[in-house]
Amino acid sequence: MNEQSQSFEIRDYLRLELMPHFMCPGCGHGIALRALLWAVHELGISKDDLAIVSGIGCSGRVGAHIDANTFHVTHGRPLAFATGLKLARPELQVITITGDGDCLAIGGNHLIHAARRNLDITCLMLNNEVYGMTGGQVSPVTSESRLTTTTPAGNIEPAFDACALAAAAGAGLVGREVTLQTPALKNLIKDGLDYPGFVFLEIISDCTEIYGRKNDLGESPEMILSQKADMRPEAYHNTAEQPFRPNSMETGVLVRNERPEYGEVYRRHAAGLEKEGE
């Protein structure tokens, strides 16, 4: 990819006819959208070559605002649809935008097998710890003791470590960043888009209107600044020595493996079978 040096103007990458956007004031998903498009701009990726697949939820609505090839699919299935798209059109830069519920609950098996295959897809999981669009239900990454509409007395389940799950399933590159650190998030997404294999990036976002209000977490500035207190800006290399702890987030590139990319393996295999049949 050829990096561009000219200044970034987000409006060049948006469907302006859909403005104003759907996001609540203070929602971190808008910062994630900006970081993604900033990365796309700096890498010089053409909008014609960009394919965005998104699922259901607040995260799923993000893709509709991008002026590129966008595909809004059923709940939990963006990685399944993206797999078919990438195999059929390998020249496209395929990105999925998904949420913690969409990706880890109903879509959990699709994440595991996408990581196992190592097809060249970049998966951005926007983690705001809640099902925001459907009323504020508990998700697989909701912190313990937090109040949601389905845990009115406080959540008693431990939170998922999505990055450890993706890494254990075989994802080629795994990373995490917070919306507070927008330039770092942009650079992490660039690393992901450059990597030839399956990439899982967890983006720590915030839901101010439903999750924040219900748990008395303050307004958006307070919620975003709280991310800083929870950050450990270093990769963890041995999860046995540095186990996942809720509210103590390792950020940056956490895992990078060199594995055969599934699409290349598939095409070589298909070509070999075709040659045998001649």
Image (cartoon, rainbow, N blue to C red):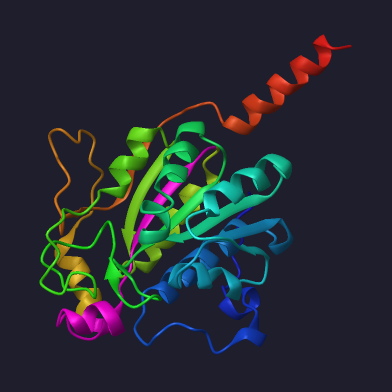
Q: Is residue 226 above or below residue 106?
A: below
Q: Nearer the viewer, residue 118 or 258?
A: 118
Tell whether 119 sits left or right of 274.
left
Residue at image x 69%, y 20%? 269
Residue at image x 42%, y 59%? 102
Residue lying furthest right = 278
Residue at image x 25%, y 77%? 211
Q: Is residue 211 magenta?
A: yes
Q: Position of residue 66 (x, y in %)?
A: 61, 71
Residue at image x 42%, y 47%? 200
Q: Position of residue 213 (x, y in %)?
A: 21, 84
Tell whether 129 sits left or right of 244.
right
Q: Nearer the viewer, residue 147 or 45?
A: 147
Q: Is residue 209 magenta?
A: yes
Quarter of the figure with residue 235: top left
- Which residues are the magenta region? 197-221
Q: Position of residue 156 (x, y in %)?
A: 11, 59
Q: Is residue 79 above or below residue 230?
A: above
Question: How many discs appear?
Answer: 0
State which quarter of the image contains the C terminus: top right
Is residue 193 among the parts visible in the rendering? no
Q: Is residue 154 above or below residue 200?
A: below
Is residue 253 among the parts visible in the rendering? yes
Q: Nearer the viewer, residue 245 or 143?
A: 143
Tell whether 205 sits left or right of 117.
left
Quarter of the figure with residue 257: top left
Q: Position of residue 57 (x, y in %)?
A: 45, 69
